[in-house]
């Protein structure tokens, strides 16, 4: 059908339709006119013009904050769709950024991200919450979510422990800023686990150096465990390894101290039995030198 014929058809139809269709007819006639104008310029591309004028009017409609928030709760608790729930909570913040609903939604989006294991998004949302609402009663929980997100990403000891160090820093922040909160107790437990992980990394590297007979490098690793991670489960072995390494290189005084401190703090440990026998085999007895860094490290904590 030619353009002129199309225009005549539209004029004919206008005589037989009601007022409700006039808006559509106006658009159609306008589009047809544009087609006429476009033809001399190009033989193609008129479809895009037609689509533009016939497209639906997608005008943004703001929804009530409470409605969006409750929809997010429904999606999270009933439908278990955490991704969709987080989008609803984010929409509250986008449409109503200065409302109390936005504050609540920001925390809930962090919670939804955490439970869906989207830890980076959780850290981002929770950090924003703490920054915007530092005095809120829920700030402690937001800070805890940051720490927990780092903690849940701690890798095994064979890999880089950067995440572990971030987890420790964030957990210490919870304990320091919110010492009386319910999250402080959980943070302390996780902190011990994270510190144990770093100690395990040091032990793993120290054992490697022992196998290579690089005793000085090994001693430095075990020394780190003894001086920084005395409360971890690795300290018994670290003291025994120090006894072995020092005896091997002939620094008997430190070997005796390591064995003595090990026996004083962990008398029933199998590691102590090994250390004791090693010192005795050299013709010596465990004997603590009060000036040794080993002795001082444990006295500092009241363990020596």
Image: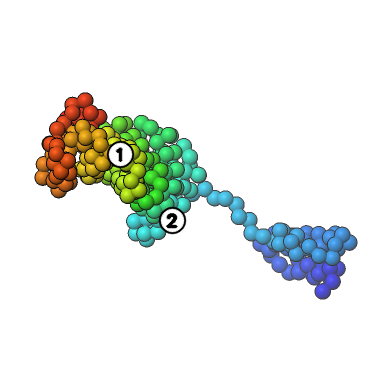
When asked about the image quadrant of residue 84, the answer is bottom left
Helix, strand or loop at mark 2: helix
N-terminal-most mark, 1 or 2: 2
Instruction: Find residue 265 and report its horizontal and vertical position in percent.
Output: 14, 38
Residue drawn 43% across the image and 56% down it? 83
Residue count near mark 1 (Cα–Cα under 10 Å), binned few <14, some 14–19, many ≥20:
many
Quarter of the figure with residue 280: top left
The residue lying furthest to the left in this view is 268
Q: Can residue 239 be spotted in the picture?
A: no
Extreme-front residue of the structure:
283
* x and y percentages locating residue 17 in the rendered image: 71, 67
Q: Is residue 42 above or below residue 238?
A: below
| Inter-mark Cα distance, 1 to 2 | 49 Å
Residue in the picture at 37% in, 51% down: 158
Above or below — where is 40 with respect to 197? below
Give residue 281's mark: none
**Residue 210 makes an appearance in the image:** yes
Instruction: Judge from the rendering whether residue 262 lies leftward or rightward of residue 218; answer left or right.
Output: left
> Residue 15: where, in percent of width, then height?
76, 67
Label 2: which residue?
83
Q: Residue 219 bears which disc, if any? A: 1
Lateral position of residue 176 relative to residue 42, left or right = left
Figure coloring = rainbow
Residue at 33% over, 38% down: 216
Residue 302: image quadrant is: top left
Residue 46 relative to residue 102: left or right: right
- Which of 258/84 is in front? 258
């Amino acid at each position: 059908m030619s353009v002129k014929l199309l225009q005549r058809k539209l004029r004919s139809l206008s005589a037989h339709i009601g007022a409700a269709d006039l808006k559509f007819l106006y658009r159609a006639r306008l589009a047809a006119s544009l087609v006429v104008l476009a033809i001399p310029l190009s033989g193609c591309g008129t479809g895009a013009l037609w689509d533009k004028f016939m497209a639906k009017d997608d005008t943004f409609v703001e929804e009530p904050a409470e409605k969006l928030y409750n929809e997010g709760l429904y999606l999270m608790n009933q439908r278990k769709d955490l991704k969709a729930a987080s989008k609803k909570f984010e929409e509250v913040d986008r449409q109503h950024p200065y409302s109390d609903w936005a504050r609540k939604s920001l925390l809930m989006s962090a919670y939804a991200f955490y439970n869906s294991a989207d830890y980076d998004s959780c850290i981002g949302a929770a950090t924003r919450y703490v920054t915007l609402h530092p005095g809120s009663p829920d700030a402690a929980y937001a800070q805890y979510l940051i720490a927990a997100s780092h903690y849940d990403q701690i890798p095994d000891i064979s890999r880089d422990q950067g995440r572990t160090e971030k987890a420790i820093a964030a957990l210490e922040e919870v304990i320091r800023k919110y010492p009386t909160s319910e999250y402080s107790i959980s943070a302390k437990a996780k902190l011990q686990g994270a510190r144990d992980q770093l100690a395990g990394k040091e032990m793993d590297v120290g054992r490697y150096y022992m196998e290579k007979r690089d005793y000085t490098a090994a001693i430095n690793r075990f020394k780190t465990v003894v001086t920084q991670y005395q409360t971890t489960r690795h300290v018994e072995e670290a003291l025994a390894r120090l006894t072995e390494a020092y005896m091997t290189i002939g620094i008997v005084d430190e070997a005796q101290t390591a064995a003595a401190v090990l026996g004083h703090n962990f008398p029933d440990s199998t590691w102590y039995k090994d250390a004791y026998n090693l010192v005795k085999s050299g013709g010596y007895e465990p004997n603590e030198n009060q000036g040794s860094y080993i002795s001082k490290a444990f006295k500092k904590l009241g363990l020596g």
